[in-house]
Amino acid sequence: MARPGNKIIQPKLVLLGDMGTGKTSLVLRFVKGQFLDQQESTIGAAFFTQILSVSEATVKFDIWDTAGQERYHSLAPMYYRGAAAAVVVYDISSLDTFARAKQWVQELQNQGNPNPVMALVANKSDLDSKREVQIQDAEEFAQEHGMFFMETSAKTAHNVNELFYEIAKKLAIAYSSKPSEVNLNNETQERRGKLFCCTG
Ligand SMILES: Nc1nc2c(ncn2[C@@H]2O[C@H](COP(=O)(O)OP(=O)(O)OP(=O)(O)O)[C@@H](O)[C@H]2O)c(=O)[nH]1
């Protein structure tokens, strides 16, 4: 809920990562508090909204959940361009998805978006017995690339709200100190989002 008198910001947030890592599941857990064992693979991208209040601002997230299948790769720039925050997701039980996450980070950092808040998210923390990616390796990679790191489970809800809260906080603080350097959504983007399938 918006706090009266509080500043309102409307950042665009994009989720990227290999197929099946749990991007949609993380968003659905955050936006609707739900989890599906048989979540369908995303086609193209899906749009969601959610509002979160932190002490510095009310944050109205415009969330673009991209499709991880390789055949949709060429669409990704449409969604990450102008994003104030990017969440790169891998699955702790698959080393391949961690390798793919690293490629996404390189791509994001090459496309010259000014100072987006970036998170590296290790999802499916409930599958610890099948872990292939060590926390330390991911933490080191995140640190080297100016990202913050979090392990989550969309299934158990572990750290999911905390992830979005942390992003909201970082965006609100960045906006308070340097408003012109934070990419925030505008009317056009909001209208465009409404042309796509909307959930949330
Ligand atoms: N055990 C476990 N399974 C999860 C978790 N998050 C997602 N899943 C499952 O992983 C599968 C893929 O989840 P999605 O949310 O569709 O993954 P995605 O990254 O959006 O996939 P694409 O749309 O293909 O890019 C589904 O069967 C989910 O139920 C989690 O935290 N733990």
Image (cartoon, rainbow, N blue to C red):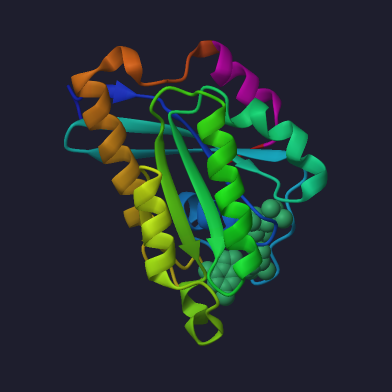
Quadrant for ligand 1?
A: bottom right
- Tell me where residue 73 appears, x and y as whole percent: 74, 40
- Residue 164 higher or lower than 188, as above or below: below
Q: Residue at x 54, y 35 (%)?
A: 108
**Viewport quadrant of the N terminus:** top left
Instruction: Say whether residue 141 is left or right of residue 82.
Output: left
- Which residues are drawn in magenta? 188-197
**Viewport quadrant of the C terminus:** top right
- Tell me where residue 157 appears, x and y as whole percent: 42, 67
- Residue 51 higher or lower than 27, as above or below: above
Instruction: Say whether residue 117 is left or right of residue 25.
Output: left
Q: Quadrant of residue 171?
A: top left
- Determine the main secondary structure of the stretch shown in magenta: helix
The single residue placed furthest to the right in the displayed view is 71
Q: Residue at x 36, y 21 (%)?
A: 182
The single residue placed furthest to the bottom in the displayed view is 129
- Tell me where residue 196 appears, x and y as whole percent: 70, 30
